[in-house]
Structures are given as C-alpha cells and as structure tokens.
Amino acid sequence: MLAAACRPETLPDLGRLLQVTMQFMGLSLFSLGGGNTLLAEYHHLAVDQYCWLTARQFADLYALAEAAPGPSSMIVGLLGLGAAWREGTGWALLSALAAELAILLPSTLLMVVACLSWKRLEASPLRHAFERAMGPITLGILFSVGLKILHSADTDAAGVTVSLMVCVLMLRTRISPLWFMAAAGVLGGLGLINR
Amino acid sequence: MTEPLAADSDHLAPSPGLAALFVGMLQVALSAFGGGLSAWSQRIVVENRRWMTNEQFLTGLTVARLFPGPNQINMAVYIGAEFHGLIGALVALAGMLLVPFSLLMALGVLYFELHELPAVDRLLAGVVAAAAGMALSMGFRILDQYWKDAAALALAITVFLALSLFHARLVPVVLISGPLAMIWYWPRSSASPRR
C-alpha cells in the first residue's frame, strides 16, 4: 500500500541512527494510559514518514508483539529492527535496542522522580486534575489507535468479522487473547482470511 | 484491616540487593509467560520475597498507571527505585525485559526472514485480524467509567476526531487538550485541599 510513493530512510551510520531514535525519545513522555496510545504515532513514523515498513508489516509486528510474552510496548524494538533490516541483521539488532532504550528512558527517569516525590504529589490538586484530565484524552486516543490498527490490518470481510468478534470476546470473556490469535491464524492458514 | 497490614510490615524481608532485584524481576518476567504480569509481580514481590507490603505495591500500581510509560515497565521501575533509586530502577527494568526482549527480537528476525513466504503470510493475515480486534477493544475497555460524564465524552470525541479524521499528531493534541482538560477538572470546591 503506497509503497511505491515512498523511499525508505536508511540508517547508514551511528549518527543517523541516534538522530532517528531521538524521535522515539520525544514520544516517550506522551505514552499515556500504558503505552498503547503511541501506536498510531509509531505507525506514522515507521510507515508514513520513514517508510521502513508497509502498513501491513506494521500490523504484522503489532500482532507479533501482542502474541509474544512480555509487555507489548516492546513493539518499538521490532520497529527498530525493521528500520535497519536492509543494513544487516547485526545493525538491525543494535537499532532495535537503541529504539527500545529511547522510548523507555525518559518515562523511566520521570517515574523514578515520581516515586521519590509521591508523598507530596499524592494529595496535590495537580495530581487530581492530571488524573481526571488524561482519562478522557486516553479514551479518544485509544479509539483512534484501534481504528488505525484495524485499517493497517487491511483484511477482507471475513477478517474484519473476526476482528469485531475478537473485540467483543475480549470485552465479555476472560479468555486469553493468545487463543484468539491462534484460532484466527488457523483460519488464515486455511485461506479463510485474506488481505 | 490494620492488623494484617501491621503483621505484613513486621514480616518484610531485608531490602534486596541489586543482584536479588535483577533475579526477582527476571523471575516475574519468566512466570508471566502467557500473561498476567502484574498479578505475578504481586505474588513474587509481595508474597514470596516479602520485599514490600501489599499497600506499597498498590501505591506503585497507582503511580505506574498515572505516569507515562507502559504500566508493567513502570511497575518494575517503582520496585527498583524503592530500594536503590535510579540504579535500582534500571536493574529491575533490565531483569524484567532481558528474556522477553531477546525472545521478541528472535521472533522479529524470523519474521523479516520469512514473512514473504506465502504460507507465513496467510497465517499472519489471520493473526493480524485477531490482533486488530484486540486493539479495537482497548478503547471500549475504559469507556464505561466515562459514560455518565458528558464533558469527558466530548473531550474523548474531540481527541478522536482530531487524530482520526483530521490526522493531527498526538503530541500537539495532548499538549493542547491536556492543559484545557486539567483546568476543567481542577478541584474547585473550597473544601478540597490546596497544595
């Protein structure tokens, strides 16, 4: 999708790599509500701006990060991997590590400060207002992110039906999402879901 | 409630060293293969190793959810920072991410090597459909708590439209809507504590 219109930004040397990872660092403090709020921004950087990945590949990597054990926010590492994949595996792994560190460092530093000063922050009106204000904003962002991922997945009607069913099942049951991904993977393997 | 809590703090183990912190977080990450990271960290940190009281742990969850960054990762930062400040936070983070991140990178390398194979692509088409459903459910999951707050819904819808319809970037949207929403939600009644 749109791949022809867009030339991949290469990361030939350490300087350029660091320059690009800075952008992840800038996003770090905007990861409200647990990190998934940044997915559409990652999509913008990796697919639209730098052309490292196609929208489809982005959706693949999102699924991979959700399926693998551990925090799904590690998708940033996968994006770093994809960004430098053309330059060789070793370089790609370094880029993956740089991207992951960049996205985690600022929020980690802020979190340490927050832990040390929590006693004072806890009762402050600033905290109260911040907590109440960020909730609805997070809500709006998450709906936008959900739509973006659905759009990137770009599956046929059968696929969209599966997406909607999984969405309802996620909300109504406590079944592990791994089962949904496994079952849908089988459907895909059988050729029942296409894109 | 006070009695078990008091008993809890009496039975706390001595503060863990950096190595113990690393191993503990590694154990949390390994136990949580398949999900339930925060339940596992509570079990290991509070019940098995007795590093902190349940109350301390729950405070950590509050801080982790409030501040930017992935919740589970922020929780590791909280636990580490509680005992050894910034160094502790980084060590706890490394312990929690070492194995899952390495595994995800291995998966990522496999993905970039193999994703063009038709069989793999078919399988992924299904998995991606399920993952898109998971992404879609994120917004609905927190929708309930804002259902009766018209201002919150209006704010969420505005943010959603700005991002999805007008393709605004996340950072300016948060920088504009955040302060406005904070003014709206600033505690107004004279009874509420100022500072």
Image: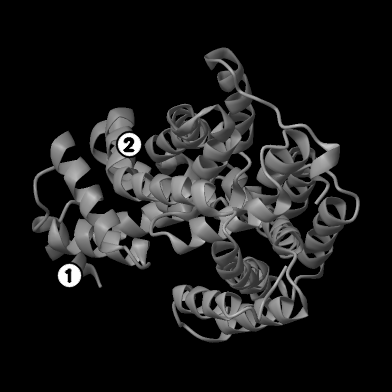
Displayed quadrant of residue B54: bottom left
Q: Is residue B189 left or right of residue B88?
A: right
Q: Is residue B16 visible?
A: no
Q: Measured along the vertical axis of the image, is residue A167 above or below residue B60? A: below
Spot occupied by residue B73 in the image (x, y as percentages of width and height): 41, 47
Q: Residue at x 32, y 66 (%)?
A: B39
Q: The disc labelled 1 sits on which kind of residue?
A: Glu
Identify residue for label 1.
B3
Q: How is the image coloured?
A: one colour
Q: Horizontally, is A164 left or right of B156 in the view?
A: left
Q: Nearer the viewer, residue B96 or A75?
A: A75
In this view, the residue in front, B145 or B164, is: B164
Q: What is the number of the mark on residue A107?
A: none
How far is mark 1 from mark 2, CA to CA?
A: 31 Å
Could you confirm whether marks 1 and 2 are on the same chain?
Answer: yes
- Amino acid type for the residue under numbered disc 2: Ala
The answer to whether B80 is drawn above or below residue B1 in the figure is above
Instruction: Name the N-terminal-most of marks 1 and 2.
Output: 1
Q: Position of residue B195 (x, y in %)?
A: 56, 40
Which residue bears the numbered disc 2?
B89
Identified at 60% across, 54% down, the residue is B116
Location of residue B177 in the rendering, given as x and y in whole percent from the top left corner: 79, 46
Front position among marks 1 and 2: 2
Q: Residue B64's spot in the image, x, y percent?
A: 45, 50
User: Quadrant of the image for the C terminus of chain A?
Assistant: bottom right
Crowd class of label 1 (few under 14; some 14 to 19; many from 20; radius 10 Å)? few
Instruction: Look at the image and tell me whether residue A189 can be seen.
Output: yes
Question: Furthest residue to the front?
Answer: B118
Q: Determine the secondary structure under disc 1.
A: helix
Q: Chain of mark 2?
A: B
Badge 2 element:
helix
